[in-house]
Image (cartoon, rainbow, N blue to C red):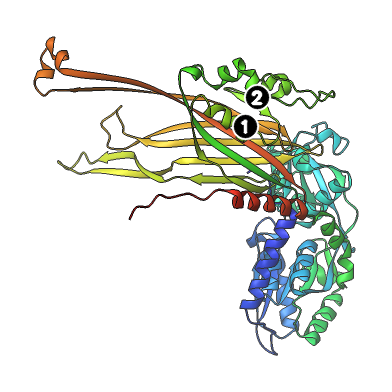
Amino acid sequence: MTHVPAPIHVRFTVLTLALALALLLLPRFTPAQGQKIRFGVGPLQPTPSETTKAFEPFFADLAKKLNREYDLVATTDWAGIAVALANDQVDVAWMGPWGYILANNDSGVTAIATAKYDGKPIYYAIVVCKPGSGVKTWPQDAKGRRVSFADVGSTSGWLIPTAWFKTKGIDPKEYFQYSDGATHAANEIAVASGQADCATDFDRNRTAMIEGGKLERNATEVVWTSEPLPNDAIAVPKDFDRALADRIQKILVGITEAQAKTILPNHYTGFVAATHENYRMIEDAIKRLDVVPLQVLIEATIAEVTLNDTLQYGLQWFFSHHSNSISLLNNQNTSGGTTTGTAADIMPQFSALSGFNYIVGGGQAKAILSALSEVTTVTVVSSPQLLVLDHQTAALQVGDQVPIISQQAQSVITSNAPIVNSVEYLNTGVILQVTPRVNASGQITLDIDQSVSDVATTTTSSINSPTITQRRIVTSVIVQDGETIALGGLIIDNHNNGRNGIPVLSDIPVVGALFSTTNKSVARTELLVVLEPRIVRGATDARAMTDDLRNRMRAVKPLELNTTK
């Protein structure tokens, strides 16, 4: 599944709040002598059951040396083991480096040992690609290709590659056809099967999959390798019994390579003593990414324009033949003058948009609607202001959920059997979804999905279910910060025929018209969507925009109600 993830700052904030609440609500627990000890391990194998099978001999041996009974839980993602340890759901955890740092920052979890792999307490993040794909120079040869990152709790599969791209000034979400959230095993399989061109992994996982027969050695090839990273941490909670922690550390460090072969998976050869300092480089990588992301304030006006004779050709005709009614700013006109024309004249990338579309200088929504109201009727359906993170989707819905019959069934076995209806609920009203993407030059790409729908009586069939009338615009446009874009061209014609007359007499053939009146009316309405995005680069911008909105609210004239006694 492809999706664009929430920024790292938001992920840390959510996780911090979750851990803080859990620590307040859950009692602290330190296993007393003879009590059961609870072990936890992250997704070091493709599935939790495989992880449990591979690492249970080690934890069973540790519990035996401690003279304790034990429980073992294997999580499905790296963030999960950090949450479990911070929540005191486990006493001793085998966790990834990033998960350890998160848990340490949130609840003071302490590392007591680092695992050795092939005799070394280090490992490497890697990127693999399909052999023969032409990717020789990373990342240049992979630009625009399908690249899958691991889940955002993974040190080697997400944090380290993303931090490395940060040092190169590259945003992976823009540079590649980006996706994330997969396990390391799924990433390798996706590349091997051709579902992805490249993917992140770590060297230990690739080796384990090859040796376990789950991956052919030549099915993927390594195209990038990170600097050495500290191996997995063995960690305990902040308030864990210090004497017991020292005892566990001594047991782990005392495991020989010969003993490791009998209780640990292949290539694990023991442990070295560790402290938080051993994982400082992971913490530094997190800090490089833990920045406040850009936000975009989107001021939207959704209006229905009733078209009269002056506007019989729609808004496109009106603006084309009344150019003196509006000025279009041309950013490339260095003389300071203004020009008029279509959106395609100003920004050629808009020439392919269907329907009416105009780019107007910043803050022109009111001028547009005022100009329209001079010659026709404008009804503002909605005028929301949405603040949304860069690359995230803002959604607004004002309307009702309407029940409709989606399926009817009747038994053919029993006579006079009742008709069974399947009912679904559809959202109606004003529905707006906007996803902004900001580039380095200040241009904003807007993915817009705007619809206005209503309920009408069904006339095309005898089904007792309403008809949903809908007008919808789905498009992607590029605008500069603070400019206004208007989208329209969705016109609906409503034809109404009515006849009033004297009963009986009006129904007489030929002469009935003498005793009746026939009314015919045609109404044409067009949907107009005006959007003005503005980039919010920090707290100062956000505060200024909030103050501006507050001042506008204070300037609104209160309604004057006429009351009679």
- For the point 67% across and 31% down, the residue is 477
Q: Work out whether residue 263 can be spotted.
A: no
Give percent across and percent down for residue 513: 17, 14
Of the pair 142 and 557, the residue shown nearer to us: 557
Q: Quadrant of residue 69?
A: bottom right
Per the image, label 2 sits on a secondary structure element best described as loop
Give percent across and percent down for residue 99: 75, 64
- For the point 72% across and 82% down, the residue is 64
Residue density around tag 1, few if under 14, some if 14–19, many if 20 or more, within 10 Å? few
Q: Are marks 2 and 1 in contact (CB under 8 Å)?
A: yes
Q: Residue furthest front?
A: 565
Q: Quadrant of residue 326?
A: top right
- For the point 69% across and 74% down, the residue is 39
Earlier residue among tags 2 and 1: 2
Residue density around tag 2, few if under 14, some if 14–19, many if 20 or more, within 10 Å? some
Give percent across and percent down for residue 144: 77, 33
Of the pair 156 and 538, the residue shown nearer to us: 538
Q: Residue furthest top?
A: 510
Q: Amino acid at mark 1?
A: Ala
Q: Is residue 25 left or right of residue 170?
A: left
Give the residue at mark 2.
326
- Quarter in which the C terminus is drawn: bottom left
Per the image, label 1 sits on a secondary structure element best described as helix
Q: Work out whether residue 473 can be spotted.
A: yes
Give percent across and percent down for residue 321: 60, 15
- For the point 46% across and 49% down, the residue is 560
Of the pair 397 and 413, the residue shown nearer to us: 397
Mark on residue 367?
1
